[in-house]
Amino acid sequence: MARARGLRLPLSVDPFFAIAALTYALTVAYAFSVPRVVEKRWLVDLQLATDALLVSALVLVTGGVESYFSTLYALPIVAACIVQHRRGGCSSLCCRGCSTRAS
């Protein structure tokens, strides 16, 4: 049985490894979407929001606020600032705030 935040979940795969597998799958999908990013800028927003949600899921599964992985929140925010300047940083920070409130 996998445990997530004190709950007993009937999962055959540990949630930590499921999130890791999902991250790898999304990386492959991101690689195939690179040629389309030039004409469809919303794909960048989608990727940055998905990255922030993956970090939130990882933090939730590994202990919530007390997780060592909470420092990873800085990575999608910095990536958004680099790629989309101020607008991307603000939107990624808002996504992080909403996902933190949900968990």
Image (cartoon, helix red, strand yellow):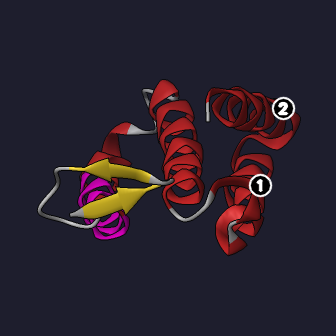
Residue type (three-letter) at the residue carrying disc 2: Cys
Instruction: Give the Cα separation between the discs numbered 2 and 1.
Output: 12 Å
Amino acid at dot 1? Ile
**In the image, which residues are magenta?**
16-29
Residue 96 painted magenta: no
Left or right of 56? Residue 71 is right
Identify the residue at image location x=76%, y=67%. Answer: 71
* Image depth: mark 2 or mark 1 in front: 2
Q: Nearer the viewer, residue 32 or 58?
A: 58
Residue 18 falls in which quadrant of the image? bottom left
What residue is shown at x 17% (from left), y 50% (from top)? Answer: 10
Location of mark 2 (residue): 90
Q: Position of residue 2 (x, y in %)?
A: 27, 63
Question: Any magenta on residue 20?
Answer: yes
Q: First in sequence, mark 2 or 1: give its number.
A: 1
For the point 72% across and 62% down, the residue is 70
- Counting the numbered discs, the total is 2
Residue 58 x, y percent position in the rendering: 51, 58
- Label 2: state its secondary structure: helix
Residue 95: quadrant of the picture = top right
The residue positioned farthest toward the bottom in the image shown: 68
Q: Is residue 30 left or right of residue 57?
A: left
Looking at the image, which is closer to me, 26 or 40?
26
Residue located beneath label 1 in the image: 82
Closer to the camera, 99 or 42?
99
